[in-house]
Amino acid sequence: MAKKILGVDIGYDQLKLALCQGRRVLKTAVVSMPENLLREGQVTSPEAMGELIRRTMKENKIHANLAALVLPNEAVYVKNVEMPEMTIDQLVYNLPFEFNDYITGEVRDYVFDYAVIPSDEEEDIEAPSSTQEEDGFEDKEAVPTMELLAVSTRRELIENAQFFLRKAGLKLKIAAPAVCSFISLIRARSESLYQVSDEFCILDMGYSSFRMYMFKKDRHVATRILDIGLSNLNNVLADLFGVDVHLAHTYLMSNYENCQYREECMSSYENIAVELMRALNFYHFSNPDSTLSNMWLCGGGAVIKPLRDTIVDMLDIDLHRAEELVPEGNNVEECYSFVQAIGVTLQENAKTGKTRRPGGRK
């Protein structure tokens, strides 16, 4: 039987917890984050963070020993790399060189990990090119390669996470970025539907920014970051009602006095939709064979109906609710908030997936 594991997603405005067992979501909880407890992706007080998680678990009667943590986007580097097949020891030695353009300081201050991306069977066989045949070149076997999703983050971040989770009575089992959470959900969805969609666009409508994650099947292709978020809408409402941004956020999410439909908010929705359109156009330009036509919404902005309607009106794309990404998602209340916390728990199941291990051919 699968073990229970608690998915932990720490955002700027909310802490989200999802207790899962295999692909079943047993319980969820959400609580507001104290101001400035998360800054530039870093938890500023591990002691306070641990106490917040412990208290939230107690108040919601969540019992767990293991935790799966969603790594903050601002503090993690993710890239697709293709390397010659090699042993695990060789890979451990060579992987840091793939991040030379990203990391600063000493390599020992960072941790590195990877997931082997399975190859399609038809890609394993490569016919000789017509040029080789015509020119009489010797047909030599190509050097076998492997495709990886590589990840790096600062060692201090992992050590702090271990500390505050331990303070909450949890042992860190898995730490993975949002990209890995979404990949696990895409794979689970494809298995349950017995089919794999060609392309996915997942829009995380967060507090400080909107992020568009592009996938071809279960391969991460690109992430587009829009420097707009719900905080922008909070500022609009704060000015309109003469309140602080925290109360304005409550007004926004509850549609206080129909504020979501105020002219100033509608103008902001249009600006957001224009930025999304630009990001999609650039993606299609960079991927001319793309047939992307579906977008899945998660994050707090997913519940703002006039924002959804504006996106539909201005973008030639079909919108889907977050529940469609999550196994039995229709049974998860406010599922849009817990998508990443649920997805990261599925990483444990992903370890048994069909992958090509380093050091040997499939």
Image (cartoon, rainbow, N blue to C red):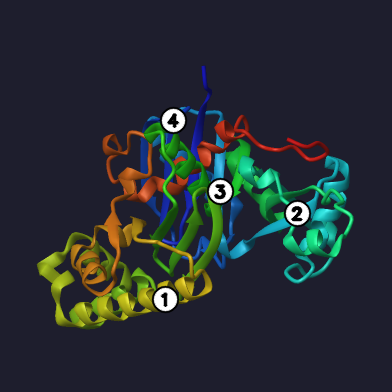
**Eye-nearest disc, 2 or 3:** 2
> Which of pointers 1 and 3 lies earlier in the amino acid sequence?
3
Q: CA distance from mark 1 to mark 4?
A: 35 Å
> Does 109 sit left or right of 292 as displayed?
right
Secondary-structure class at tag 2: loop
**Eye-nearest disc, 2 or 1:** 2
Q: CA distance from mark 2 to mark 1?
A: 35 Å
> Does 8 sit left or right of 232 as displayed?
right
**Eye-nearest disc, 1 or 3:** 1
> Which of pointers 3 and 4 lies earlier in the amino acid sequence?
4
> Which of pointers 2 and 1 lies earlier in the amino acid sequence?
2
The residue pinned by badge 1 equals 281
Seen in the picture, residue 32 relative to 330 is either above or below; the reply is below
Please state the horizontal and vertical placement of residue 127, each as a whole percent of the image: 72, 50
**The disc labelled 4 sits on which kind of residue?**
Arg
The residue positioned 34% from the left and 58% from the top of the image is 294
**The disc labelled 1 sits on which kind of residue?**
Asn
**Eye-nearest disc, 1 or 4:** 1
The residue pinned by badge 4 equals 23
Few, some or many C-alpha atoms within 10 Å of disc 2 (few <14, some 14-19, many ≥20)? few
Please state the horizontal and vertical placement of residue 226, each as a whole percent of the image: 44, 74
The residue positioned 64% from the left and 44% from the top of the image is 119
Q: CA distance from mark 3 to mark 4?
A: 16 Å
> Which of pointers 2 and 4 lies earlier in the amino acid sequence?
4
Few, some or many C-alpha atoms within 10 Å of disc 3 (few <14, some 14-19, many ≥20)? many
> Which of pointers 2 and 3 lies earlier in the amino acid sequence?
2
- Marks 3 and 4: CB-CB under 8 Å? no
The residue pinned by badge 3 equals 180
Please state the horizontal and vertical placement of residue 342, each as a whole percent of the image: 44, 40
